[in-house]
Amino acid sequence: MKKSEVVGSPSAMIDGRIAELDDWRGEILAKVRAVIRKADPAIVEEWKWNVPVWSCDGILCTGETYKAAVKLTFAKGASLADPKGLFNSSLEGATRRALDLREGDKLDGPGLTALVREAVALNRAGKSAAKAPKAKPGLKQSTKR
């Protein structure tokens, strides 16, 4: 199956991408997808820019495939703690961070789960902050006790 033949729902399109990659990249993308989907039941699969995208209250990460790597790019990766040191690409950027998985690499499932959950929490915190009422300029907030 060629990339141009991948059609349907986002999940079906991701299935198609995995199927068309009949080598180690398809296996890695399938494993990554399973970890991401299990990390939080509210995660939604999307298809944007001709790549898989996982979202929850905003984009979490994309799953790009190249000849030499499967790249997970976290939209707000620079704001995420990475205690296991999974990020190994796009480290110089002010916003995004990426994890490049190459042939033969072992996927750190628990580490990726923690990273995805942190990204979900960050998106949810941002959404809550956006909904919080803001004080109007020039008005003092009441300090009644």
Image (spheres, rainbow, N blue to C red):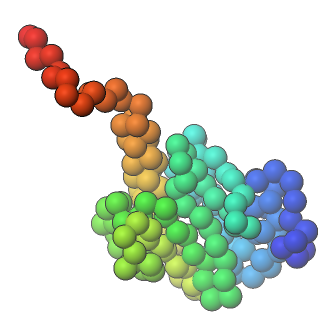
In the rendered image, residue 47, in percent from the top left (x then y), is placed at 72, 58
Q: Nearer the viewer, residue 134 or 48?
A: 134
Q: Does residue 68 appear to the left or right of 105 in the view shown?
A: right
Q: Does residue 49 appear to the left or right of 55 in the view shown?
A: right
Q: Say which residue appears at 19% left-offset and 28% top-offset.
A: 138
In the rendered image, residue 97, in percent from the top left (x then y), is placed at 44, 71
Q: Does residue 18 appear to the left or right of 40 in the view shown?
A: right
Question: Where the N terminus falls, by quadrant?
Answer: bottom right
- Find residue 141 and report its image quarter: top left
Q: Say which residue appears at 55% left-offset and 79% top-offset.
A: 101
Q: Which residue, as the protein is rendered here, is positioned at the far bottom? A: 68
Height in image: 60 above or below 16?
Answer: above
In the rendered image, residue 22, in percent from the top left (x then y), is placed at 80, 79
In the rendered image, residue 105, in percent from the top left (x then y), is placed at 53, 82
Q: Is residue 78 visible?
A: yes
Q: Is residue 113 visible?
A: no
Question: Where the C terminus falls, by quadrant?
Answer: top left
Height in image: 127 above or below 102?
Answer: above
Q: Say which residue appears at 74% left-offset and 67% top-offset.
A: 50
Q: Say which residue appears at 82% left-offset and 70% top-offset.
A: 19
Q: How many marks?
A: 0
Q: Which residue, as the protein is rendered here, is positioned at the far front? A: 138
Height in image: 129 above or below 7?
Answer: above
